[in-house]
Image (cartoon, grey):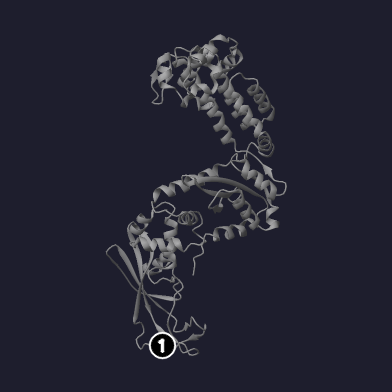
Amino acid sequence: MYIIPTFRKIVNLNCKKYTFKEIYHKDLTLTVEIRGKYSTACCPECNCKTSKRKDKKLHKNKQALKHMWYWWNQVIKIILFKRRFICTKCKKSFYEQFEFESEHWNYTKDFEKYVMWSFGFLSGNKIAELYQTSVSTIYRILERIDVKQLITRWLEIIEELDEIYLWVDEHSFSWHDMVLVITDLKTKQVLAVLDWITNKILEDWIKLIPLKTQLKIKGFNTDMNKGYANTLKEIIWNPIQWVDKFHLFWEANKMVDEVRQISIWALAMNFIKIEDIPKLGKKIWKKLTKKDIDKLRKDDTNKIMKKYKEKAEQRLQADLIDPKNLINSKWETIEYDEITADFFIEKWYRKLFFWREKNLSPIATLRINQIFQEFDHLGFLQEAWTLKEDFMDAMDNLDMNEIDRIRDDCLNSEHYRIKQFWRTIKRWYNWIKWFCEHSTPNFKFTNAYTEWVNNLCKVAKRQSHWFKLKDMYIRKLTAKFCHKNLQIYT
C-alpha cells in the first residue's frame, strides 16, 4: 500500500502529473512504467495546448530511459507510454513531453546529474559499468558541460558577499602544461579553472568581475608567486597580500635538510676536515679537486656556534628524560641505544629534523640531542634547526619582533644556506607582516583549501586515462566541483 508513494520520493517524480502503471525487477534493473495524467499537451512549435490525439489507443508508443542509480551495479529504468497529439493551430503532430525527459532519448536529466556527480571519485569506464551504459554516452554527457557556467555561476554568488579573499594556485595537467585554480576563502568554493597560467589570462578573468564586486576583494594569496601578485596589485584597489605560512615552513625545513646533507657528506669524506664544511658551499654537489681541498685546508677562520648548541640543548631538555625508562609506540619499556657515526651517515635521520619540537617523542628527543652533541661539531645543524623552530613558533604566535630577530641571525650566520633563508624572509617580509597584522589566534589565513582542491584534481586525473585534451580535463573538474548547478548545451 505504501510502496508506490515511497518509491515516488526516491525517484524524484511528481505524482500529480504521472501515474505509475507497473514496477518490476529483472536482471539488476528496476523498471518503472509511467504514463501522463493530463489529457492535454503543449505543442513544441507554437506552445498551444491541445487535447486532440492522433492515435486511437491511449498509450501506443513506448520509450525506455535510464533514470538513476539506486544500488551497486543496479539502475532504475523508466518506460514512458507516450501519446501522440495533433496541434489544432499549426496542424502538426507531436509526442507529449515529460519534465524529467532529456533531449537524448536514452536517459533522463537526473541521469546526467548522477553521472556528473560520479566523476568526482570514479573513472569513465567505471561509471559506464556502474550505470550499465556505454562509454560514448559518458563522453557525450561530459562534452555537453558548459565550462563558462563555472565563472558566471560564482560571479552571482560573490556579489552577495561583503568581503572576498582570493587564492590562486596552479598544478600541472601534463608535464609543463599547467592549469590555474582560483578559490574563495569565505565560500570555500572553486571560482574558476583556467586553462593556462599566464598573467594575461588571470587579468582577463579579473576584468570579467564587475567593478562593484572588485571593490569587495580585500586580499589575495598567490603561493609565493610574484607574477600573479603583481598582476592582482595592478587591477585590485588597495588589496591585502599575505603569505601562506606553510610554504615558509617548507622553505625552513628545506634549509635544515640541505645543511644536514652538507654535514653528512662532509663527514663521509675522510679527506676533508670538519672545519672545512662551511667553505665548501655549493661545491659539495660537484666533484672536488686536490686544489680545492688544499685551499680549504690553508684557511682556518671557522668559529663554533656555541650559543646555538647551548640553546638547542635547553630547548630539547634531554637531561629530564631517563634513557633507561622509555616507552615506545606499543607502550613497552625499552632502553635507549646510542647510534654510531657510521650508522648516522647510513641512516641519515632525515624525517627527524622535519618534526616540530612539540611533536618529538622522548626517544626522538634523545636521538636528535645526541646528533647535535656528537656529529655536529661546528653547530651549523643546530643553528639551522633552532632558527627553524623559532621561526615556526613566531609565525604561530604572530610575533613580528621575533621574526626580526631571526632575520638578523640568519644574516650574521657563516653558513651560506642559512643566509639564503635570510633572503627568503627579506623578499616576503611585507607579506609576513600583513599576515601577522590581519590574522588572529582563532583565525589565520591559510591556503590549505586550495592545496586540497589541487590534490583532488590530481587524484581525479589519475583515476581516468582518457584526458588527451585539456578541455575534457577542465570539464571533469567542473563536474567534480560544481555538479549541482551545471548548464547543459542545447
Is residue 100 visible to the viewer in this orientation of the structure? yes
As displayed, is residue 394 above or below residue 108? above
The percent coordinates of residue 341 (x first, y second) are: 43, 14
Q: Nearer the viewer, residue 79 or 306?
A: 306
- The residue drawn where x is 59% and y is 46% is 167
- The residue drawn where x is 55% and y is 49% is 181
The percent coordinates of residue 405 (x first, y second) are: 67, 24
Q: Secondary structure at mark 1?
A: loop
Please state the total of marks drawn on the protein image: 1
Q: Nearer the viewer, residue 39 or 418?
A: 418
Is residue 339 visible to the viewer in this orientation of the structure? no
Residue sitting farthest toward the front = 291
- The residue drawn where x is 55% and y is 61% is 149
Near mark 1 (Cα within 10 A), the count class, few <14, some 14-19 or many ≥20, is some
Which residue in the protein does label 1 denote? 53
The percent coordinates of residue 302 (x first, y second) are: 59, 12
The quadrant of the image that shows the N terminus is bottom left
Q: Is residue 23 left or right of residue 195?
A: left
Q: Nearer the viewer, residue 284 or 287?
A: 287
Q: Nearer the viewer, residue 311 or 377?
A: 377
Residue sitting farthest toward the right = 238
Q: Is residue 285 left or right of residue 84?
A: right
Residue sitting farthest toward the left = 27
As displayed, is residue 178 above or below residue 372? below
Which kind of residue does numbered mark 1 sit on? Arg
Give the quadrant of residue 270.
Answer: top left
As displayed, is residue 94 above or below residue 131? below
The percent coordinates of residue 117 (x first, y second) are: 44, 57
Give the quadrant of residue 143.
Answer: bottom left
As displayed, is residue 13 above or below residue 164? below
